Image: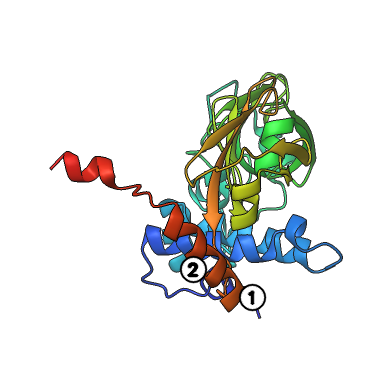
Amino acid sequence: MAKNPYDILGINKDASEADIKAAYRKLAKKHHPDLNPGNKNADAKFKELNAANDLLSDAKKRAAFDRGEIDMEGEPRYQEQPQHTYRDYANGPQGNRYHSNGGDFDLSDLEGLFGGLGGMGRGRGGFTPPPADAHYAIQAGFLEAALGAKKRITMPDGKTLDITLPEGIEEGQQLRLKGKGMKPSGDAYVEVHINPHPLFTRKGKDISIEVPIALQESVLGVKIKVPTIHGPVDMAIPKGASSGLTLRLKGKGIKGGDQYVTLKLVMPKDIDAELEEAIGKWSASHPYNPRKHMETAT
């Protein structure tokens, strides 16, 4: 049975954009390979979640899928039709994968590129000239875009095209591959879309992350391991650190940018008698009111 992106994300077909985003983030955090060391299925599951999110978060792709025009991978669902013309091909789902910038027209080009389609011959009129430039869109992982990566795309004629994502490429940025279009005179333009990360967000070259800390780590001040796009690093937590405190890791962002770490104080799940007694004794002799400034402002 073909995979259904709605089932993968566990949402209904009438789910809103916010529902899709929330479902993806929840499952991405659960199945991210970095958080599931030793789980051989985590990587495949994470890629499946990204594919489902990519399709459903794009309104045009989602509508095309709901109409049965494309599958979960964004590929057209072909139906046999008699006597295809090039116009049928170019205006159909497959033709939407690239656009024409014009160019010289030669019937031999049609025979070479689309000879497998029935009903095309030199005697038929009304053809649309074959495209010169080709336009593609690809999905890249957050870390692939941040650090740079090699990617491969499949062109409409079945050939593959290898591209290099430069370090720090941004959402929606286009790469131009000279001479790699549908004709030798044309170029290929690849638009890059970046999948969200369950832990990191970015703004320009800077990376942000929220890191939970325990009660004793806040009180005593310790060094903890913090994830960065370059790998985990040690970071000092100052004594008395509160939720919302943001610390900077210089140079740990993209291309020399920084990483900003916002702390989130997380209390123990169970407050036992020993902790309750210790805090009770301390608070009896150390009264303080963190909301005092709010009382004087009203």
Numbered circle sitting on residue 298: none
Measured Cα–Cα span from mark 1 to mark 2 = 12 Å
- For the C terminus, give its image quadrant: top left
Q: Is residue 274 above or below residue 227?
A: below
Is residue 253 visible from the viewing direction of this image? yes
Q: Which residue is painted at 83% across and 68% down in the image?
A: 39
According to the image, what is the colour scheme of the structure?
rainbow
Image location of residue 245, percent across then percent down:
50, 39
Q: Locate the N terminus by quadrant.
A: bottom right
Front residue (pair 52, 147):
147
Judging by the rendered image, the residue that carries numbered circle 1 is 2
Mark 2 element type: loop
Q: Picture quarter containing residue 108?
A: top right
**Relative to residue 17, is residue 269 drawn left or right?**
right
Q: Residue at x 75, y 31 (%)?
A: 148
Q: For this view, does 5 lie left or right of residue 11? A: right
**What's the residue at 18%, 40% (across, down)?**
296
Q: Is residue 292 left or right of residue 123?
A: left
Given the current orientation, which residue lies at the most extreme left position?
Answer: 298
Residue 68 disc label: 2
Q: Residues within 10 Å of mark 1 (few under 14, many from 20)?
A: few
- The type of residue carrying mark 1 is Ala
Q: Residue at x 43, y 60 (%)?
A: 284
Question: Helix, strand, or loop for circle 1?
Answer: loop
- Location of residue 95 in the rendering, given as x and y in whole percent from the top left corner: 55, 45
Residue 176 percent coordinates (x, y): 65, 22
